[in-house]
Amino acid sequence: MHSHILVIHPSEIVLQGLHCIIKSVFDIEPVLLKTLDSLTNHVDANKSQLLVLADESLDQKELSNITLAFPKTLRTKIIHIRQLAEPSCDKSCKCCLPLNASRSRISELIRPILAEGSRPMEKRRLSELTERETDVVRLVALGKTNKEIAKELYISIHTVISHRKNITEKLGIKSISGLTVYAILNNLIDTNSIDPESLI
């Protein structure tokens, strides 16, 4: 698996209890923190996914900082550890974990998240692009200019530029050569159709 698990809670009992369950069920050594101090020192950004089990007392701003602290390539999922289950939180809820949850409930909640993290990053990224953004990536990889892409897709150059900006934000890829590699890895283009001059 390519996931990293972080548990943030002021209670040593909660930290050690979740550590024991996560270690025995998933064979993953979670990082245990009582506060958010030095958060980035404890996480390997080379992992594809970060799962955070966070105390419900952390406010929304603090939780947002967790996501912003790491590269966009690190997919972050946050689950709230609650004293009591919210009325809206039933067994299908994937956003919170009551303190009285059983080992099997913890396993049911975490296992699908870890399975998602084990999928290749390229495939997950591809699913984040809209159909039109995927068309733009394909045409950029084929060496088309913004004007040519606009003409082929019957959209304005401004719209093409907007799509390219969104693609860069989603994929973290800025260069044409990088998008070409991405397109090849995701079978968006045939390598025989690439103009080598467009990569220089």
Image (tube, grey):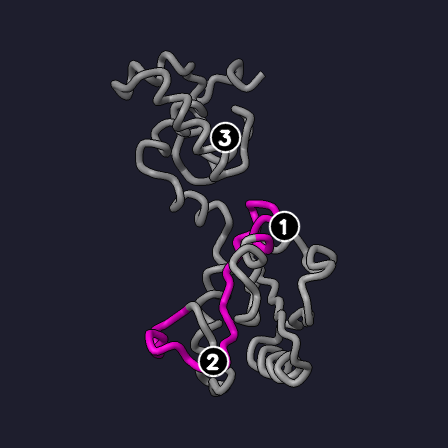
101 in relation to 152, above or below = below
The residue most toward the left is: 154
Left or right, 21 with reference to 194: right
Q: Mark 1: which amino acid? A: Ala
Badge number at residue 145: none
**Closer to the observer: label 1 or label 3?**
1
Badge number at residue 179: 3
Q: Start and end of the magenta stretch? A: 65-94
Sequence-first disc among 2 and 3: 2
As for residue 93 lying within the magenta part, the answer is yes
Sequence-first disc among 1 and 3: 1
Badge number at residue 69: 1
Secondary structure of the residue carrying tag 3 is: helix
Q: Mark 3: which amino acid? A: Leu
Q: Position of residue 67 (x, y in %)?
A: 56, 52
Quadrant that contains the N terminus: bottom right
Q: Residue at x 39, y 77 (%)?
A: 86
Residue 47, quarter of picture: bottom right
